[in-house]
Amino acid sequence: MTDPLVLHRLDPARPPPASLEAWLEALPGPAMLQVPGADRSRSRALVTLLHGNEPSGLRGLHTWWRAGLATPATDLLVIIASVEAARTPPRFSHRHLPGERDLNRCFRAPWQDAPGRLAQAIMAELVALGPEAVLDLHNTSGRSPPFAVSVLDDARHRAFASLFCDHLIVTDLRLGALMDAAEHLFPTLTVECGGSGDPQADAHAAQVIHRYAASDNLFGALPASDTLKVFHNPVRVELAQGARLSFDPADQADVTLAADITRHNFDLCRPGDTLAALGTSGLAALVARDHRGRPVLGELFTSHDGALTPRQPLHLFMATGRADIAASDCLFYVAPVSDNKTS
C-alpha cells in the first residue's frame, strides 16, 4: 500500500491512459495535479474521490484531461484522494478501505490514523495554495439529480452553486467533512453529481470540471429566485444502534426500506406515503436529530399500520438503494417544507 501521507505529483504533460481503469491502476496513490492557468495570480482547487465508490469526479477529470487540459482561467490544483479504496476489488465499490474510517469524516481531530493523516496532508496543500475556491465532487449512492451542498448561504455561494446545478442544500451539521474544515479558509462547495454508476452523473461531472476551470468569475452572477432551490438543515435519518435494515420484506428486519426509495430524492413526500416497513420495534429502530442534536423523529414521522410515513410534508434527499451504506451512514435526509427558503 502506498504512503497515505504522500500526495504524489502528476505531470500535466503526460495524459492518462485511454482507459479509466488502467489509469486508476497506474496511479501511485493519493495524487495531485497542478495545471497553470491564464491568470497566474489566482488559484482554485478541485478535490475528487474522497470516497472510493464515487467515481464520477475521476471519470470527469479523465475526460477533461484526455481532451487536452484546456488552459484554465486560474491555476488549478486537482487532488485525487481515495485511490486505494477505489481500486480495491470490486473496483469503485468501497467508500473507504475496510477497517478504516471514512476519509470525509477525518478533517477534524483525531488524525492519528492513516485517513486522518491523509486529510491533514490534503488540508496542508490547500492552505499552502490559498485558493479563491474549493470544489469537492461526489456521487450519491442512489439515483438523484445533481445538487450542491454548502455550510454558508450567501450571494457568493448561491452564485457558485448555480454554475453547476439547480438545488443547494445549506447545513449547519458538522461531520468532519472537507467542506467543514475548509469553509472558514476558502469558499467551499460540494457538488453531488448524481448516482454512482450513472453515465449522466459522469457526464455532469465532466461538465462541472470544465465550467469550474473555465469560468473567469465564479461568484459574479446571482441566480434568479426561481432557478436555484435552497434547502436548509436537512435532518439525517439513521438506523438505531443494534437495529437491522433490509430491502427484502422476507427478511423481517427492523427497517425494510421501500425498493424504490431513491425515486423520492428531491421529491415532496406527504403523510400517507410509505418510505419503509417497520418491525416490532417500530420507530425505536430509527434515530433523527436536527443540527443542534435535538431528537426530532417523532415530529417528522409516524408509524401507520407498521409503515414509516411522514407526519408532515417533507423534502427527501440522498436516499440510497444500498443497504450497507444506509446502515453505516444514513437512510436519507429530510427537510420540512416550513424550514426551507427557496428564494
Image (tube, rainbow, N blue to C red):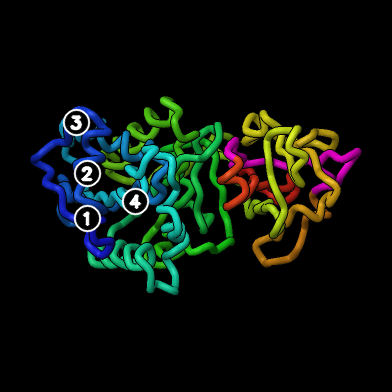
Inter-mark Cα distance, 4 to 1: 27 Å
Around disc 3, counting alpha carbons within 10 Å, would you say few (fewer than 14), some (14 to 19), or many (20 or more)?
some
Residue 290, numbered circle: none
Residue 66, numbered circle: 3
Where disc 2 sits, the SS reads: loop
Residue 82, numbered circle: 4
Q: Position of residue 236 (x, y in %)?
A: 65, 53
Between 160 and 98, the residue placed more toward the observer is 98
Whether the magenta-drawn stretch holds residue 309 is answered as: yes
The structure residue drawn at horizontal position 25% and vertical position 63%, both measured from the top left corner, is: 125
Task: Report the residue that reaches farthest toward the right.
Answer: 305
Answer left or right for 311 relative to 242: right
Q: Amino acid at mark 3?
A: Arg
Question: Mark 3 or mark 4: which comes first in sequence?
Answer: 3
In front: mark 3 or mark 4?
Answer: 4
Q: Which residue is mark 1?
A: 42
Q: Position of residue 127 (x, y in %)?
A: 28, 67
Question: Mark 2 or mark 3: which comes first in sequence?
Answer: 3
Magenta residues (range): 301-322
Q: Quadrant of residue 265?
A: top right
Inter-mark Cα distance, 4 to 2: 27 Å
Q: Position of residue 259 (x, y in %)?
A: 68, 30
Inter-mark Cα distance, 1 to 3: 24 Å
Question: Mark 1 or mark 3: which comes first in sequence?
Answer: 1
Label 2 close to label 3 by CB (< 8 Å): no
Q: Amino acid at mark 4?
A: Ser
Whether the magenta-drawn stretch holds residue 239 is answered as: no
Where disc 1 sits, the SS reads: strand
Q: Which residue is mark 2?
A: 73
Task: Report the residue that reaches farthest toward the top.
Answer: 199
